Each structure stands twice: as C-alpha cells, then as structure tokens.
Amino acid sequence: STLFVLNGPNLNLLGTREPAVYGHHTLADVEALCAAACAKAGFALRFHQSNHEGALLDWLHEAGRLHQQGELAGVVLNAGAYTHTSIALHDAIKGTGVPLIELHISNVFAREAFRHHSTISSVARAVVCGFGVQGYVLAIEGLARL
Ligand code: DQA
C-alpha cells in the first residue's frame, strides 16, 4: 500500500534554515530516509513538499480516495507553521478519515508559545516531535505497526 509523506511551508529550506533548530539534513536527505524506511516496511512512498496550503489539502484528498479503496497505509504530515493556524487541514484530515501522523522535526513544546497549539493533533492518530529528521523514520515505522 501507499504511504504519503507531506511537507508544508519552508521545509524546502531544510539544510540551510536555522540549522541549530532543524539540523543540516536537506529535504532530499529526508526523502532518502523515508524511501529506505518505506522499502523496509513494504510501502510505496509518495513524498511531497509545498508552500501552499491548498496543495497540501489536494494531497490529503487524494490520500483519502486511496484510503477508501483500501490502498493507503497512512500519511505522515509535517505541516510546518500551518500546524498552528490551519483549520482547513484539520477539516481535511477529519473529512477524509486518513490515518495520519503529525510530525515535527523540532520539539515544538520547548519553543515559542505560538508553537504549542496544533489544529491537527486532535485529528491525528499520533504525534512525533523532537527527534530531528529521524522522526520521519519513526513515524513510518509507527504506521507499519498500527
Ligand atoms: C516544524 C515546527 C513548526 O513550528 C515550524 O513552523 C516548522 C517546522 C518542525 O518540523 O519542527 O516549519 O513543523
């Protein structure tokens, strides 16, 4: 079955963006980590990044259609700052019923107060946060065990 890894705004800047917070790995490195973890778990990987909220919604809807056909392992979503603002992402996750892991590279709870609230957590199966880019691997392994 298929597993989506979706990345939101500014995650294309990984590697150069605040390396003290997010590390030195690039998004291409993250994709390679995810590809290896999916190969091991027997999942076909769909890996995407967009700075546009609507693109993330479209991929969630596509994941929802695969879910209805019994062809979706789940979604790993790092929604970036939309995590803290987007009711539309909340509604899409709820409306499609996709099994979704909310992911953050950094420990958002050790950072600014505006990162402590997520619109997504209440509709996510689980949350992975603070493990750096290895969190993507943990989230994929977690979906394999659900
Ligand atoms: C992030 C945390 C968010 O607060 C931030 O806006 C991001 C990345 C993370 O992966 O740690 O863009 O989701």
Image (cartoon, rainbow, N blue to C red):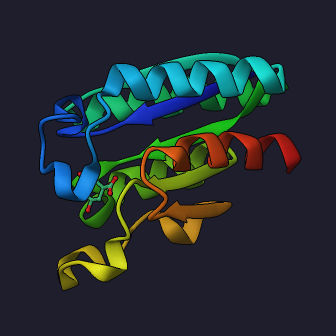
Q: Is residue 53 left or right of residue 4?
A: left
Residue beneath the point at 65% across and 48% down: 138
Q: Residue at x 46, y 22 (%)?
A: 31
Give 25 or 70, whichever is nearer the viewer: 25
Question: Which residue corresponds to the image point at 51% horizontal and 68% vertical from the top-left?
Answer: 121
| x and y, in percent, of residue 17 in the image | 12, 42
Q: In terms of image quadrants, where is residue 12?
A: top left
Residue 61 percent location from the top left of the image: 52, 30
Residue 7 on image: x %, y %? 37, 36
> What is the count of numbered marks?
0
Q: Residue at x 36, y 33 (%)?
A: 56
Is 92 displayed left or right of 35 in the figure?
left
Q: Indicate the quadrant of ligand 1 in the picture.
A: bottom left
The front one of 132 and 65 is 132
Quadrant showing the N terminus: top right
- In this picture, residue 85 sits left or right of residue 71: left
Residue 22: x and y in percent read: 27, 51
Look at the picture and state if 38 lies above or below 88: above
Q: Does residue 8 appear anywhere in the picture? A: yes
Between residue 58 and residue 105, name the one nearer to us.
Answer: 105
| Residue in the foreground of this view, choosing between 53 and 11 | 11
